[in-house]
Image (tube, helix red, strand yellow):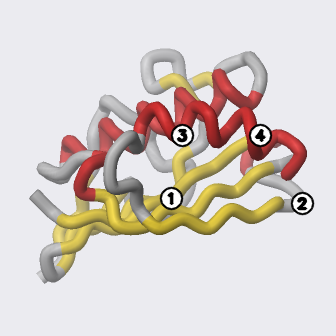
Amino acid sequence: MKRIVSTEEAPKAIGPYSQAVVWNGLVFLSGQIPIDPATNQIVEGDIAVQTERVLENLKAVLAACGSSLDRTLKTTVYLKDMSEFARMNEVYARYFTENPPARSTVEAARLPRDVRVEIDAIAIAG
């Protein structure tokens, strides 16, 4: 049976989707963008600042699912500009220090609310 998960510690869904779905021992997280859940506003700053906010949002949703970044199996990173890959990767590496998940990174023509980065994930449920 699938279970829908939502937390106030991450931005609310801005459309007809769930923050996360838990099913069959896995957690499927919707893409997170750099919205501060306290203000519901996009965080100002460069790709490093925005990537940190995105990963904090993912971490909060994972926690609400009883999981964690350490239990993440796969992420997909969407960048507005692939030339910012190295800066994004520096921040990403701080969050996934050991046994990092599989990852795909793609450049997207346009992301929601014109942000610089969006990341989704699949993890092992808690």
| Position of the C terminus by quadrant | bottom left
Q: Answer yes or no: do the residues labelled 3 and 2 have beta carbons within 8 Å? A: no
Q: Give the CA separation, mark 2 to mark 4.
A: 10 Å
Amino acid at the residue labelled 2: Ala
| Position of the N terminus by quadrant | bottom left
Q: Give the mark, 3 or 2, whose residue is nearer the N terminus.
A: 3
Tell me the quarter of the picture where residue 24 sits: bottom left
Q: Answer yes or no: do the residues labelled 3 and 4 have beta carbons within 8 Å? A: no
**Residue 92 place in picture, x, y as percent:** 54, 40
Q: Answer yes or no: do the residues labelled 4 and 1 have beta carbons within 8 Å? A: no
Q: Give the mark, 1 or 3, whose residue is nearer the N terminus.
A: 3
Q: Give the CA separation, mark 2 to mark 1.
A: 17 Å
Q: Residue at x 52, y 17 (%)?
A: 39
- Label for residue 72? none
Q: Which residue is mark 3?
A: 92
- Label for residue 109? 2
Amino acid at the residue labelled 3: Tyr
Amino acid at the residue labelled 1: Asp
Amino acid at the residue labelled 4: Arg
Q: Give the CA separation, mark 1 to mark 3.
A: 13 Å
Q: Residue at x 65, y 22 (%)?
A: 49
Q: Which residue is mark 1?
A: 120
Q: Which residue is mark 4?
A: 116
Q: Give the mark, 2 or 4, whose residue is nearer the N terminus.
A: 2
**Residue 74 place in picture, x, y as percent:** 43, 67
Q: Give the CA separation, mark 3 to mark 2.
A: 21 Å
